Amino acid sequence: MSKNITMFPENQIYLASRSPRRRDLLRQIGVKFNLLLMREALQRDADIDEQPLINEIPIDYIHRVTRMKAAAGWQRMIQRQLPVYPVLAADTIVTIDGCILGKPQDQAHAETMLRTLSGRAHHVLTAVAVCLKDHVHIRLSTSTVRFREISGREIRHYLANNPILDKAGAYAIQGMAAVFIVDIVGSYSGIMGLPLFETAQLLEDAGIEIFQ
């Protein structure tokens, strides 16, 4: 995406995500945003099917879903006749052994996920997309996280005291799960849910100034 010569006078974007972590990360780099959601009652980011396709590999899945979220946000903006700003969307998945670990369905599913991650390294993929003038531009952040061995008691205590049903892989790096992490290679903000390096590049290319 080539950098626009004409900047948006308001220097604002729409965020097509319900994630409070993504809001905090955008505020961290001074980006002004408005939430752009499908329906206030929904807990998911957009009214789209996020189920993986048959034999779909993780990198193809996250690119597809993130593009769909950004495009859906753009259509919402047009349908509601809102002021035109770039629309940002993102998606995060955890992968291990080529399998996708998305958001757990329930506590039992979350416990299975954490047992799978215990004592092993896994990958966290976060794609961020910006839709502008019907074109979706996307970047991907890939990080590696290694957990120590986690006991069943620790898993149960963690799940009982932390909201995890909206967390890919059933954990949040910025919370209590940090004590499970031996090391990370990659982007801390990407693991949180919005890689700020890639996000800033996309927004600047779209005409949003990070440093004003």
Image: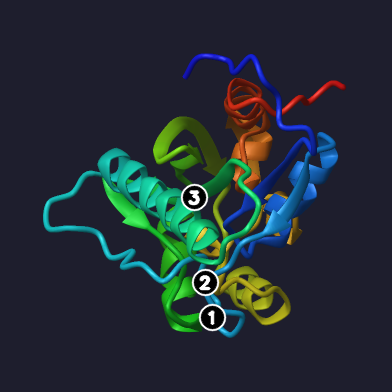
Find residue 179 and report its horizontal and vertical position in percent.
Answer: 72, 51
Find residue 159 and report its horizontal and vertical position in percent.
Answer: 62, 76
Give the quadrant of residue 158: bottom right
Nearer to us: label 1 or label 2:
2
Please give the label number shown on residue 38: 2
Q: Is residue 114 left or right of residue 83?
A: left
- Viewer can see residue 65: yes
Could you say which is closer to the camera, residue 107 or residue 191?
191
Structural distance between the alpha carbons of marks 1 and 3: 18 Å
Q: Amino acid at mark 3?
A: Thr
Q: Which residue is label 1 attached to? A: 42
- Viewer can see residue 97: no
Q: Is residue 206 left or right of residue 178?
A: left
Give the quadrant of residue 82: bottom right
Residue under the image location 68 percent in, 51 percent down: 22
Please give the label number shown on residue 92: 3
Does the residue at mark 1 contact the one at mark 2 (Cβ under 8 Å)? yes
Find residue 33 and report its horizontal and vertical position in percent.
Answer: 74, 49
Q: Amino acid at mark 1?
A: Leu
Residue under the image location 65 percent in, 47 percent down: 192
Could you say which is closer to the camera, residue 64 or residue 174?
64
Q: Earlier in the sequence, mark 2 or mark 3?
A: 2
Judged from the image, the secondary structure of the residue bearing numbered disc 2 is loop
Find residue 123 and report its horizontal and vertical position in percent.
Answer: 44, 40
Q: Earlier in the sequence, mark 1 or mark 3?
A: 1
Residue under the image location 31 percent in, 47 percent down: 64
Please give the label number shown on residue 189: none
